[in-house]
């Protein structure tokens, strides 16, 4: 393996330029034209066009042209927002595409699957998705699942070929071809890519693989139901307004035209068409923001669930620790050696065979950190000795299994006359292979426990008795093994983990550590990271002897689960779910996939994880760092908070707009206060406010000191809807008061409309500012940066000035000139409309007490 150099980086880049990326066309990617067609079908767009047509029928071409001009402005805003969302989704598709391990410039490199080119050398292992069609050049017990191409569920064996250049057809045993999109279910191998992209077998049959699934979230379904109900309400009001308007003002064609105009204005004011846009943009951009924290979102619903997580089940190795193994102590022949003593001294002869067979029980070109550490010690201490076997060939591999936590390798010497068997694994498993006596076992386990108590990961190593190749047994237990000793590996904790653990506890999130190590090793690491309740441990063997109810009870008080095999994770997830927990589970192997899929939030490892684990998970941890999970939880809570703020604002502002459109209809001597053009103006402020201001809001200061959100909590809860509607009603009362007082003072209709509209715009801006936080006042929130806020505030003031003081625009909006004192009135009264809400915030701040943390 180590002699293969593969392509150079420049050769790979040249082929990428000539032949294109290794990907298939994406049928669901949307360009600007597609988005524009979708906008044209939106109810708001159709209502605007209908208004323009009615204005033409009424003989008012200026109003019609202006309204149709607004149509293109609204379309432009929507297209920009949707393109921004689409770019975020495209970036996520690229990031979450399968990764490939290749050899380039003689070194192993992990690259995006889309960058694999013809001629690349792939390193394939159990759990990998094959990124391109290739021919195996070297293989050890390779099997593949080709059901994606053949429809057959049985796995097929693969055999290496040094000379073949032509791909066979999928299906059938003992062939050398492996195909893009298929899954390596067993073994490891090296393959040469012969076809990529559209030239692969899957490309020829035209199947498009999607990495990021576009599925409707629970929030989107809930919102869709609400929008449909509101649309029915809006249409009902529209019909009611048309009929009432005509009946109360005379049954003439002109009145009916005006009635239709009033009805459409009411429908526009009632329909909360911003809701689906808000959810789509917030969740897509939220996934993009989370990716900046080294966490990729494969399934959007995981973002919703993040803020509700109550338990994080985390692998110790590589997530809580750095996964940078170094050999700390070795034990052989009743002698214990600290490797610090080897800095200026050779490895004593008594330990040579232990290190030699530890290396033989590892891969020749290892990826696993433990095997790398063994190999580094061997190269450093055993170079130029007979104990390193670089030119030996691996004949047979006996993999680790849940029944036996040990693996064995059979090696053949270059002359073919000698076979060596090496085994390594859990000390008790290796001791079992060696059939040690009870007293030997007790001594061994005491030494292993002592090393584990120092936080070391302990491996046992054994040497098998040489046998003829023809007599290789089916099981490891059929070899005769001699126990050689113990190897203790140190894996330091990540420096960011203790603080992240405390942040979880402050947020009411419990952390459960899952490891295959000894209980004492797990407890030592748990103390280092600040985990709670370290005295209680459940082990894998104990778990097997518990029924589901007993397991649920034990897990309620236990934060450490040791000596676990991947298959047991599914039971752990189900037990926690049965106890009412919202579970996030990490995993990296093929056998972790069921648990990742069963968890509310499956989190796969991006660095060391298999493709199978990544496909089963909702999130992928790029840097395998626990603190990144905590950052994702923080962002998940922030996203949900900001969605609630945006939706509360939408409901609040639609109340006064709908009220001002509807109320005048029932008074025959009143003219309409709000015409469609006024509602469109407001939509130009409402749409970007929802999608830009609230999406960009920073997290609340207490976001990680609250308990997890109840997953049954509805986005449109009675409490939040009540406050939003009360806010809207207070604005409606104030603005309607301005209109009535202005009329009572004898001002003309256009004067009253202009002052009422200006007050409504100011009140709208006040609603935006008030809804930025439901716990902090407007003044305190002004210290929080939000560039979009200032752009929209300034832009709204400029637009309002134009429609009030540019004569041609003022006439189109049916306003009369406002004086300075009128603007002061609208500014003060519009601001006063939400003051009760600010007072409520201050009252809540005085009464607020921290909620006890749940550990």
Image (tube, rainbow, N blue to C red):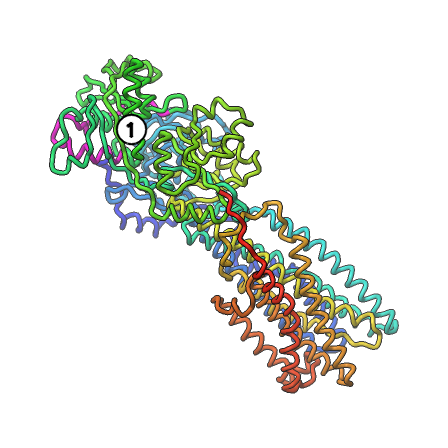
Residue nearer the viewer, 146 or 321: 321
Instruction: Note whether 727 is above or below 405 in the view shown.
Output: below
Q: Is residue 295 magenta?
A: no
**Residue at the disc numbered 1:** 450
Mark 1, Cα crowd under 10 Å, few <14 / some 14-19 / many 20+, is some
Q: Quadrant of residue 116?
A: top left
Count of numbered tags: 1
Residue 159: percent from the left, percent from the top? 34, 26
- Does residue 480 appear left or right of residue 142 in this picture? left
Instruction: Note whether 734 is above or below 612 in the view shown.
Output: below
Q: Is residue 479 visible?
A: no
Residue 143: percent from the left, percent from the top? 39, 27
User: What residue lies at 30% left-to-right and 47% top-to-bottom?
Assistant: 12
Residue nearer the viewer, 545 or 128: 545
Q: Quadrant of residue 442?
A: top left
Instruction: Note whether 189 is above or below 774 in the view shown.
Output: above
The N terminus lies in quadrant:
top left
Instruction: Note whether 525 is above or below 249 in the view shown.
Output: above
SS at circle 1: helix
- Does residue 352 appear left or right of residue 745 in this picture? left
User: What residue lies at 39% left-to-right and 36% top-to-bottom?
Assistant: 128
Q: Is residue 382 magenta?
A: yes
Q: Is residue 116 visible?
A: yes
Write the start and end of the magenta stretch as one range.
Answer: 371-400
Residue 197: percent from the left, percent from the top? 41, 44
């Amino acid at each position: 393996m180590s002699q293969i150099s593969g392509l150079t980086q420049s050769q790979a880049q040249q082929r990428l330029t000539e032949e294109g990326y290794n990907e298939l066309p994406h049928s669901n990617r949307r360009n600007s034209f597609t988005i524009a067609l979708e906008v044209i079908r939106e109810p708001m767009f159709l209502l605007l066009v209908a208004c323009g047509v009615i204005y033409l029928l009424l003989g008012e071409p200026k109003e019609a042209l202006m309204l149709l001009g607004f149509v293109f402005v609204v379309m432009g805003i929507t297209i920009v927002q949707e393109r921004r969302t689409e770019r975020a989704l495209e970036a996520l598709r690229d990031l979450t595409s399968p990764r490939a391990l290749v050899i380039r410039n003689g070194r192993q490199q992990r690259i995006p699957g889309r960058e694999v080119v013809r001629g690349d050398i792939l390193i394939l292992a159990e759990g990998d998705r094959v990124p391109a069609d290739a021919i195996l050049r070297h293989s050890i017990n390779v099997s593949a699942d080709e059901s994606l191409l053949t429809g057959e569920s049985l796995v097929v064996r693969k055999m290496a070929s040094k000379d073949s250049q032509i791909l066979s057809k999928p299906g059938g045993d003992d062939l050398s071809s492996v195909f893009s999109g298929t899954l390596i279910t067993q073994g490891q191998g090296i393959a040469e890519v012969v076809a990529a992209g559209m030239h692969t077998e899957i490309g020829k049959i035209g199947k498009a693989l999607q990495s990021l699934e576009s599925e409707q979230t629970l929030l989107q379904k809930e919102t869709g139901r609400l929008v449909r109900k509101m649309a029915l309400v809006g249409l009902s009001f529209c019909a009611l307004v048309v009929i009432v308007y005509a009946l109360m003002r005379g049954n003439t064609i002109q009145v009916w035209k005006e009635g239709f105009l009033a009805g459409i204005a009411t429908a526009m004011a009632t329909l909360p068409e911003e809701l689906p846009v808000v959810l789509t943009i917030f969740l897509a951009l939220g996934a993009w923001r989370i990716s900046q924290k080294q966490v990729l979102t494969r399934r959007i619903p995981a973002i919703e669930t993040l803020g509700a997580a109550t338990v994080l089940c985390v692998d110790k190795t590589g997530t809580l620790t750095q996964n940078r193994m170094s050999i700390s102590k070795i034990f052989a022949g009743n002698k214990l050696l600290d490797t610090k003593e080897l800095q200026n001294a050779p490895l004593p002869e008594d330990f040579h065979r232990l290190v030699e067979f530890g290396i033989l029980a590892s891969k020749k070109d290892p990826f696993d950190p433990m095997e790398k550490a063994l190999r580094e010690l061997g190269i450093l201490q055993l170079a130029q000795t007979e104990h390193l076997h670089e030119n030996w060939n691996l004949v047979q591999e006996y993999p680790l299994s849940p029944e036996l936590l040990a693996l064995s390798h059979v090696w053949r010497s270059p002359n073919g006359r000698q076979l060596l068997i090496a085994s390594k694994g859990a000390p008790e498993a290796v001791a079992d292979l060696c059939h040690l006596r009870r007293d030997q076992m007790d001594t061994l386990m005491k030494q292993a426990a002592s090393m584990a108590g120092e936080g070391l990961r302990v491996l046992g190593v054994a040497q098998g008795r040489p046998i003829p190749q023809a007599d290789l047994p089916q099981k490891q237990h059929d070899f005769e093994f001699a126990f050689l000793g113990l190897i203790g590996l140190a894996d330091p904790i990540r420096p960011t983990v203790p603080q992240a653990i405390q942040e979880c506890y402050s947020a009411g999130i419990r952390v459960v550590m899952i490891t295959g190590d000894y209980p004492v090793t797990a407890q030592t690491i748990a103390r280092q990271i600040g985990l709670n309740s370290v005295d209680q441990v459940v082990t894998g063997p104990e778990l097997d002897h518990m029924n589901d109810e007993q397991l649920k009870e034990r897990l309620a008080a236990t934060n450490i689960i040791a000596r676990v095999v991947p298959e047991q994770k599914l039971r752990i997830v189900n037990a926690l779910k049965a106890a009412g927990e919202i579970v996030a589970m990490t995993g990296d192997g093929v056998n972790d996939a069921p648990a990742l899929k069963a968890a509310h939030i499956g989190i796969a490892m991006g660095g060391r994880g298999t493709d199978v684990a990544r496909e089963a998970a909702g999130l992928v941890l790029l840097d395998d760092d626990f603190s990144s999970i905590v950052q994702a939880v923080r962002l998940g809570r922030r996203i949900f908070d900001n969605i609630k703020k945006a939706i509360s604002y939408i409901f609040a502002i639609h109340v006064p707009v709908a009220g001002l459109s509807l109320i005048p209809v029932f008074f025959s001597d009143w003219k309409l206060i709000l015409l469609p053009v006024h509602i469109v103006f407001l939509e130009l402020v409402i749409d970007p406010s929802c999608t830009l201001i609230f999406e960009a809001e920073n997290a609340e200061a207490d976001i990680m000191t609250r308990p997890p959100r109840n997953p049954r909590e509805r986005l449109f809860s009675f409490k939040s809807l009540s406050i939003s509607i009360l806010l809207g009603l207070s604005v409606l009362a104030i603005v309607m008061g301005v209109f009535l007082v202005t009329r009572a003072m004898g001002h003309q209709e256009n004067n009253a409309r202009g002052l009422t509209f200006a007050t409504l715009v100011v009140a709208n801006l006040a609603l935006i500012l008030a809804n930025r936080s439901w716990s902090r006042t407007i003044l305190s929130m002004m210290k929080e940066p939000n560039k979009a806020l200032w752009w929209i505030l300034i832009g709204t003031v400029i637009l309002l000035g134009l429609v009030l003081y540019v004569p041609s625009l003022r006439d189109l909006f049916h306003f009369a000139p406002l004086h300075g004192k009128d603007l002061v009135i609208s500014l003060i009264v519009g601001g006063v409309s939400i003051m009760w809400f600010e007072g409520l915030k201050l009252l809540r701040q005085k009464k607020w007490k921290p909620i006890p943390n749940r550990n």
